[in-house]
Amino acid sequence: MPDLKQSRWTELWRKEDYWAIWLGFILIAAALYLFMPKTSDEMMSKIAASNEILKVESEKAPFKTIAYRKAVAAKEKFKASDSDIGKTIAKFTKKPQGWSTNPLESFFLSKEALYPNVKSRMAESTLEAYIRQLLEAHRTPTVTVAWQGGEPTLMGLDFFKRSVEFVEKYRRPGMTFLHTMQTNGTLLNEEWAAFFKEHNFLIGISIDGPRALHDVYRVDKGGKPTFDNVMRGLRLLQQHGVDFNVLTTVNRVNGDYPLEVYRFLRDEVGTTWMQFIPVVERINADGLTLYQEGTTVSDRSVGAEQFGRFLSTIFDEWVRHDVGTIYVQTFEAALSNWLGLANSGMCVFNATCGTGLAIEHNGDLYSCDHFVEPNYLLGNIQDRHMIELVASPPQIKFGLDKRDTLPRYCRECDVRFACHGECPKNRFVLTPDGEPGLNYLCAGFKEFFHHIDFPMKLMAGLIRRNREAQEVMQILERAFTGVERNDPCPCGSGRKFKQCHGK
């Protein structure tokens, strides 16, 4: 007689999917066992040890580490080409006593509409007036003379030799100078490199990452890639011992490759100072990008969330390996704000602005290098001394508007202290409540500042204790050791480690 019980199970196995159901239960149980977040005593002790650093003393110790290594060179026009010849713009980086100095962070727009049918070369008389007034405006012993373009090297070496001569002519006893230039590096040769070394120039080199990423937008007027020429110029600077830093514009393409860009700059270029400038290029009604108008951005503009991910990813690499050896401008500014310092070192992350003026070839002085437009023309240094122009009511209002025009959404934001609405040029979208004036990059910056909060508090705590900020690397190593991907992140965000600092 056949085994009825066995035959029934055999029939069910053949005809039904009970086997699949049971297999599913087994897999679910295994997953729960293997991947369910754990809060072990060991992990909690690590977190407690790390949080001990967060205790803040009332007094503020000197900012010992993560300080600016050097002044930051000015920035040249994004995707500069030979068609920009002669359109040299000097950056007025030093102001009368009481004004702070900030690095440049924009690309320059076409000047044909502002100065049509004009050969835009700075005359020697204008150059001399600029240098003389710049030195007269200073009551501090150190003066920065910064140049950018277009492409400043197109002015020729003799122009900058005269600049140095005028500096020596008008210097006062005890004055020291930092000459800076932002260049794409394609025209550098032995003569340029020797000149830079002789006069202690700090050179900013514009490079957007490895060859494949750099050459997407960094092309010459004929559309040919420039990577090889840039690297050739860079190696010349290194061979001559010229001090340099790197400026990288973050666009829609290279914004997806943060680690590739960062590691290339660190390991292959060999720079210890980096600037990451988001490309936000607004398209006007006429389809051009001349003025700061319109709410549509160009195809090469970086996405808001994309830029936030870019910075966060690089930060995670930096904070685990490179604190104290590699300096990233945005991270420096952020730490300054976490320390509660009055000036972050970057105008875009300060409460007010107005100290990043730009002077044109003819002596026209504009409120900001982002706003070289008719509505922001302060005057001409041939007619009024730049001290008067910098201290004029329109310029004072321009600087205060950065703070006073913030929408409520920004004023109530928990990371306002770190962001301050970023740059006014990017405030052209609506808040969730429909109020105008929200920064295009808001979502990205908000995510980034939340992401770095825990390590920044650690570093700020270390500095307030008169300890070295780079100790954060050891603290994080201890806190993160043994943490599984699906464990709660030790930073306390409430997210899984793999979705937070374990990316």
Image (cartoon, rainbow, N blue to C red):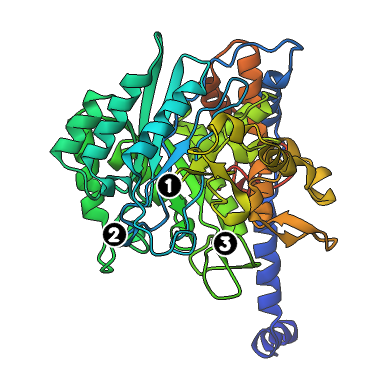
**Residue 30 numbered tag:** none
Q: Is 186 displayed left or right of 321 in the figure?
A: left
Give the structural element (helix, strand or loop) at label 2: helix
Measured as percent of width and height from the top left, residue 308 is found at 59, 51
Measured as percent of width and height from the top left, residue 435 is found at 82, 59
Measured as percent of width and height from the top left, residue 309 is found at 57, 52
Q: Earlier in the sequence, mark 1 or mark 3?
A: 3
In front of the other: 312 or 90? 90
Q: Residue furthest front?
A: 383
**Residue corresponding to mark 3:** 291
- Pointer 1 and pointer 3: residues touching (CB < 8 Å)? no
Give the structural element (helix, strand or loop) at label 3: loop
Question: Label 1: how many residues lie within 10 Å, few (<14), some (14-19) or many (20+)?
Answer: some
Residue 489 visible somewhere in the drawing: no
Q: Nearer the viewer, mark 2 or mark 1?
A: 1
- Pointer 2 and pointer 3: residues touching (CB < 8 Å)? no
Q: Earlier in the sequence, mark 2 or mark 3?
A: 2
Q: Nearer the viewer, mark 1 or mark 3?
A: 1
At 60% across and 12% down in the image, what residue appears? 62
At 26% across and 57% down in the image, what residue appears? 226
| Alpha carbon separation for disc pair 2 and 1 | 20 Å
Which kind of residue does numbered mark 2 sit on?
Answer: Asp
**Residue 362 numbered tag:** 1
Is residue 249 placed above or below 58 in the rendered structure?
A: below
Q: Quadrant of the N terminus?
A: bottom right
- Pointer 2 and pointer 1: residues touching (CB < 8 Å)? no
Which kind of residue does numbered mark 3 sit on?
Answer: Tyr
Which kind of residue does numbered mark 1 sit on?
Answer: Asn
